[in-house]
Image (tube, rainbow, N blue to C red):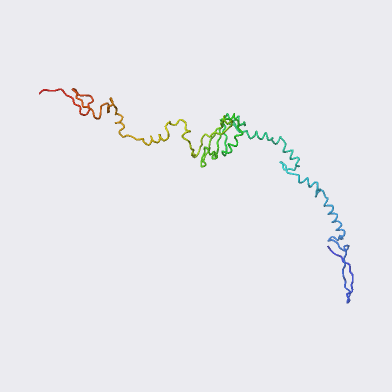
Amino acid sequence: MAVFKTKDKVWNGVAWVEIYNPTSADLVDVKGTPLDEVLDDLDEAISTHSVDPDVHVSSGDKTKLSNLASDADATYATKSALSTHAGDMTLHTTSGDKSKLGKLADDPDATYATKTEVAGKTKVWTYDTYGDMVSDLTNFTQGEVGTQAIVKDPTGDTDNIDESFKGVAFYVLQYDEGESELYWDFLYTVGEPAEISLLWSEIEGKPSSSTTDIDDAVSKKHAHTNAAVLADLGDDDDMLTYKGAAVGLVYNKTYFSEPDSPNVGDTWYDEIVDE
């Protein structure tokens, strides 16, 4: 701002000294507008700005702003509008319908069917862990007995699977009449073999002999290099024979004609020839 000063003179005891005592009326801006007018315009502008609805909102409108939220199509809606959207059945399903959707699955012909409908076909359910399969048991019914399942990590089945097993396990859905409940029955595994303990008493079709007797018999097992000779041994009236002939301590026999099967020490008389 430029300042136009008014001049006054003051005697300092030696000479007159000119001093300047400007007033607000003497002050102007760069455009030459008196400062009083500029300040008046500024007060009015500030007062007008504070209530300008294009720039500010009322305290009531400010509360409304806090209740606004972006909806799905990126425009803005009130909470009431969003609530209506959430309950719009053309866009969402009820909790009951959501439960039904959880029980739907692709059947072999690529359409959708319930677990009951699929159970009678070739559908096999796949689970990440043994616990996932057990947790899903409540979603099956007795009519689905026979449904099969594959478990990618069956190590949670400590009754049938060793914790070090690497592979998958197969199960079939069964119904326990006594307990009146469904359960997953272990079938077999595919992968590295698991060490499964099996009690001798639980084996079906096992030998009637005890394991001790069987081990004893195996320990006495031996082979004969002269098995062919032994096969020709026999007995005749409690007398040991070999190929039908008596062996051992026997009485020598005398024949008047050449016998067919003589024993050692037997004799026979041939025709006597006079010379």
How far across and how far down the image is residue 274, in percent? 11, 22
* Residue 26 x, y percent position in the rendering: 88, 63
Tell me the quarter of the picture where residue 125 sits: top right
Q: Nearer the viewer, residue 244 or 1?
A: 244
Quadrant in which the N terminus is drawn: bottom right
Q: Position of residue 224 (x, y in %)?
A: 32, 34
Q: Which residue is at the far bottom?
A: 14
Taking depth in this image into account, of 79 and 137 the one nearest to the observer is: 137
Q: Position of residue 245 (x, y in %)?
A: 25, 26
**Quarter of the figure that contains the C terminus:** top left
In the picture provided, is 81 more to the left or to the right than 136? right
Q: How many marks?
A: 0
User: Viewed as shown, does residue 114 lie left or right of 251?
Assistant: right
From the viewer's perspective, tell me whether residue 152 is left or right of residue 256: right
- Depth check: 48 or 272 in front? 272
Q: Is residue 155 above or below residue 3?
A: above
Q: Does residue 4 appear to the left or right of 108 in the view shown?
A: right
With respect to residue 220, does 31 lie above or below?
below
